Image (tube, rainbow, N blue to C red):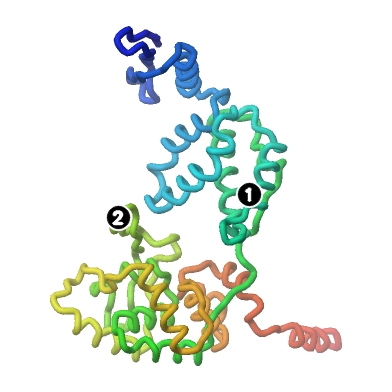
């Protein structure tokens, strides 16, 4: 590595030669340093990264973490992670050295995050706080697993937030039918919400549906992709989890509705998206429909909760419901336990009989 002064601009330039992980010799450089000290500081950071030395700053390690992780995950997933890193982590920890960040510093950061209020006086939600905490911990775990960081300081600091909001809103069947009736003036909206409610699919799964996904002879719809709008581009990805790849049996009335709807979409091809609308459009229609129907406003994702609630009320098991909505049965049991009818009395009665024999 070499440092030179450019007499024409009166700035410093660094040329850095290194061997990458494949053994290939490479060279990079950076110009425009106002002082030699700044150039030397950048030089040390590059040497630390090349040696995978955790004496580097948090900001520099994030660059290495990005290079390692970004190619391995979905584009929309990385976009979420990158936003958290850029806005919530780097501003606080960026200049600190990875090997010197302590549990006390993380606790102080957690307290600031939990005390934060926006212009309307609203704090971050517990779920969001948990997501931010998990991302910080993931970076330190990566450093510990692959770059010899002694320990993850997040472990000592403990967590903040919680995994899921305890409040789960959903519509009863009667509430949904009132809402659906208010949607009938706009066919695109009506059929979109019909698919969401009667099949329990996710918003991204709905927006990725094509005519080829439907088999009306078998009354099925195949869920095998998800739609995202990212940086002004339409992105089609794999579903959220491996379990999310599934075939859903549709009720006959819904098959008829979707067949009628597809006939109205002039020139649509088998691989074309059916619901060429945005998530913002759906949210706006939720506002409009809930107000017109006189029902409580719930989130789009809560329609999925409403579908699960309906199936529980109809007497289906957690395993059967999980298979339909693309969840693990343990998740259904845990998240919707309060909706399943209690078997405690029946258990006690049978234990009495068992004891008496």
Does 99 appear above or below 172? above
Does 94 appear above or below 10? below
Label 2 crowd (10 A; few <14 / some 14-19 / many >=20): few
Q: Residue furthest front?
A: 119
Label 1 crowd (10 A; few <14 / some 14-19 / many >=20): some
Determine which of the numbered discs, if any, sits on residue 232 in the image: 2
Mark 2 / mark 1, whichever is N-terminal? 1
For the residue labelled by badge 2, is the local secondary structure a helix, a strand or a loop?
A: loop
Report if the CB atoms under discs 2 and 1 are less than 8 Å apart. no
Q: Quadrant of residue 7?
A: top left
Q: Quadrant of residue 88?
A: top right
- Residue 59 horizontal side relative to residue 78, left or right: right
> Which residue does the numbered mark 1 point to in the structure image?
113
Q: CA distance from mark 2 to mark 1?
A: 30 Å
Q: Residue at x 50, y 45 (%)?
A: 87
Q: Position of residue 51 (x, y in %)?
A: 49, 20
Q: Residue at x 39, y 80 (%)?
A: 193
Q: Residue at x 48, y 42 (%)?
A: 86
């Amino acid at each position: 590595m070499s440092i030179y002064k450019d007499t024409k601009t009166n700035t410093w330039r660094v040329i850095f030669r290194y061997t990458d992980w494949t053994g290939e010799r490479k060279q990079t450089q950076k110009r425009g340093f106002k002082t030699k000290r700044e150039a030397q500081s950048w030089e040390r950071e590059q040497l630390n990264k090349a040696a995978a030395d955790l004496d580097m700053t948090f900001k520099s390690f994030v660059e290495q973490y990005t290079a390692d992780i970004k190619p391995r995950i979905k584009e929309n997933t990385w976009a979420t992670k990158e936003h958290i890193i850029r806005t919530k982590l780097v501003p606080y920890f960026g200049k600190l050295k990875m090997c010197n960040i302590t549990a006390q510093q993380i606790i102080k950061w957690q307290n600031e995050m939990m005390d934060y209020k926006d212009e309307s006086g609203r704090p971050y939600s517990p779920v969001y706080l948990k997501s931010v905490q998990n991302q910080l911990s993931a970076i330190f775990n990566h450093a510990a697993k692959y770059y010899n960081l002694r320990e993850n300081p997040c472990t000592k600091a403990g967590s903040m937030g919680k995994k899921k909001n305890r409040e789960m809103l959903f519509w009863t069947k009667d509430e949904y039918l009132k809402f659906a009736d208010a949607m009938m003036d706009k066919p695109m909206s009506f059929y979109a919400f019909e698919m969401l409610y009667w099949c329990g699919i996710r918003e991204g799964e709905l927006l990725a549906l094509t005519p080829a996904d439907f088999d009306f002879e078998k009354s099925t719809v195949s869920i095998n992709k998800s739609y995202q709008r990212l940086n002004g581009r339409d992105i089609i990805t794999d579903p959220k989890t491996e379990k999310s790849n599934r075939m859903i049996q549709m009720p006959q009335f819904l098959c008829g509705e979707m067949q009628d709807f597809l006939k109205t979409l002039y020139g649509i091809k088998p691989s074309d998206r059916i619901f060429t609308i945005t998530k913002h459009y759906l949210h706006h229609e939720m506002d409009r429909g809930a107000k017109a129907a006189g029902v409580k406003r719930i989130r789009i994702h809560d329609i999925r909760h409403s579908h699960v609630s309906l199936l529980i009320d109809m007497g289906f098991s957690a395993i059967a419901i999980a298979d339909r909505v693309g969840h693990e049965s343990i998740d259904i049991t845990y998240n919707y336990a309060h909706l399943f009818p209690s078997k405690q009395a029946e258990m006690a009665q049978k234990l009495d009989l068992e004891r008496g024999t």
